[in-house]
Amino acid sequence: MRYAETGYNLEVDLSTGNIERVETDPKLTELYLGGLGTNAKIMWDRVPPETEPFSPDNLLIFSAGLLGGTPAVGANRTMITSISPQTQFMAYSMMGGFFASELKYAGYDKVIIRGKSPKLVYLYINDDKVELRDASHLAGKGSVETQEQIKKELGDMRIHVAAIGLAGENRVFFASIEQGRSSASRQGLGAVMGDKGLKAIAVRGKKDISIARPEEFMPLCDEVLRYAMWRQENPVPGMIPILAILGSPQEMLECDEKWHTENFSWGNARTRRKTFWNPEIEELWTDAQLKARKRLISCYNCPLKCGATITSPNEGAYMMKCFSKLTYTMAAYVDDLNFGFDIAKRATEYGIDGFSGPQVMAFAVELLEAGILTEKDFEGCPTDNQGRFYWLLDRIVRREGIGDVLADGTYWAAKKIGNGAEEFAHNNIRKQEQAPLKLGSVNPLYYLMYCINEKGNITQIEGQFPQAPYADPKDREEFCKDWFQVPDDRFKEYFMKWEPKGEFAMPYYPGIKECCEIVDWMERMHYIDDACGVCTGLSAFHLKPPYHIHNYPLLISAATGMDIDEAELTKISKRNRQLVRANNVRRGYRRADDTPPEDHWRKRLPEYEKQIMDAMCEFKGWTLDGVPTKETLQELDLGFVAEDFEQRGIYKDGED
Ligand code: SF4
């Protein structure tokens, strides 16, 4: 009997229309848990490095996590994996909401899509009944509209639908997959779905998930819930509002945007407006937010309500959460938050990533102002900031005129446009737009996180360790008192010693060894979340979260019956992490790809940065070129990766 997981995947070949329910090997659960871990293994086994993102051989995997659908609070993430058209590396993007648990209740851990459908279709999963249905009448429809229409057509409003909009159909490199109150936004997975001719996946499940030791598991889940509620009532003192409490950044709850609007950069990640937030703006923005926000909403089995239904007067109702509240407004240099709420509705229907989308548009505006793009490229475009953004959004998702070039993102567009455009694509890591942040002196902890984070998204690696020290040692002591989430007391010592100024301050404290350990801990927690399908808003993204390295093994053991301890869970997370890197190394990824945008910090320390990255390579068990060594791989039962690297001459490349 299989516990927590269903033990079955759904294999769908869109080229032939063949659908199979395939039993999975329990050994894979022991080695990789599930979610991102088993996705990475499938990608390794079945997607050779020569595979192009838009090849029928590329897979698109929708995976619930190992704890998805169980009573574990917030275990509702869907991990979607494929090869990204933008980065050309393995992409993984998470969405919350209700899809993953529904998939588990239908009796599947994953849906693995291969091939390409000759006409637009959607996949309908209703427990054991699974079929491909014609979606030609949904062509060009918005992602939210599509979800509603499918539910109506199938006569069941409890179906959960993941769908693409026009951007996905037109293979925009930053197209998202939207689902109810959540979105798999980054790395262009919507484009892969569109390329396969798949408009949506609709799922309805009515089966049970079995738990190995429910009498142990339920009290642990209760404890997580109790602690999460306690944390909401007891914010961490001295932190900005969104980091003081739990949740995916509580942007829908919080109206105070002083920190974001003055620290993040406006336009094409260009300008910090250090005095932007004043009482007048605060009043206007608070009013706009409270009027637009209809109600706060949660994902499946979570009390934290990080999302909101937004009713924008001009564009109708939709769902929003997190930083997309600000990205359009700030990228367009518009001082009215209503603009952000309005344009985000259209962008959600089109299905585009709220990080990359606005930056691509701001980049185009800069190119026009610099004379690299011309009025001819912008024929018919309004001249005001808001009008220009709407115009660009419509062109990009339709791939019309200059929109066709911009639809590939800033890196590829700059290459095509030439004439110095490359310098304006200044905020990328591995060809993907980053959070619009440009700061003063290099911060070694963040330097390392930007470098090694293979998702290419800073929020998917940071979290457990405070971003800055408290000035008063008494506050540090107070913080450490109930900081039981640390893997061991060394991390408390590092924090106790850390000062805002002087000998124990950035950039040389925490030191190189400490930085490697801290970053490794933070990353490890994200990999555990992504295998278990737990939302990082209750775990890795936060200080003092309810899920941590001490209770995770207990939860996983009670749910699955596998009996793993902290050491074993750490080993599994390392294995998953190395396997994601291995997939990318085989596609040509090397240390040179581990590079933050050059202008991310004004003041850089090239020699020191090199030293800490050298140390990180050693710490992770990589060659200095960023390739996992044979020894590292063998220790983690990944000898087959080492063999493959040898056959391909990858180690020789590294030594060269
Ligand atoms: S913390 Fe927020 S984003 Fe995460 S599961 Fe709960 S409601 Fe959803």
Image (cartoon, rainbow, N blue to C red):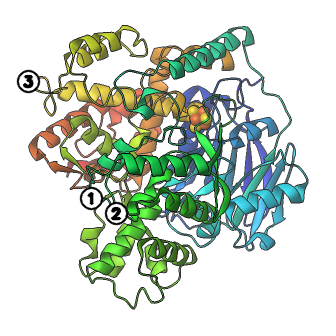
Quarter that holds the N terminus = top right
Q: Residue at x 41, y 9 (%)?
A: 482
Spatial separation of the CA atoms under disc 3 and disc 1? 31 Å
> What x and y, as percent, mark residue 340?
50, 59
User: Relative to 228, is 196 on the left or the right?
Assistant: right
**68, 285: nearer the viewer:** 285
In this view, 480 is above or below 317:
above
**644, 309: nearer the viewer:** 309
Residue 34 visible in the picture: no
Q: Which image quarter: residue 216?
A: top right
Q: Which image quarter: residue 115?
A: bottom right
> What x and y, as percent, mark residue 510?
19, 26
Q: Amino acid at mark 3?
A: Glu
Q: Quadrant of ligand 1?
A: top right
Read off the residue under disc 3: 503
Q: Residue at x 38, y 71 (%)?
A: 412
Read off the residue under disc 1: 271
Q: Which image quarter: residue 313?
A: bottom right
Q: Amino acid at mark 1?
A: Thr
> What x and y, as percent, mark residue 358?
44, 63
Query: Are the residues at dot 2 and dot 3 in contact (C-beta closer than 8 Å)?
Result: no
Helix, strand or loop at disc 1?
loop
Spatial separation of the CA atoms under disc 1 and disc 2? 7 Å
User: Relative to 394, is 651 on the left or the right?
Assistant: left
Read off the residue under disc 2: 267
Q: Earlier in the sequence, mark 3 or mark 1?
A: 1
Query: Are the residues at dot 3 and dot 1 in contact (C-beta closer than 8 Å)?
Result: no
In this view, 605 is above or below 415:
above
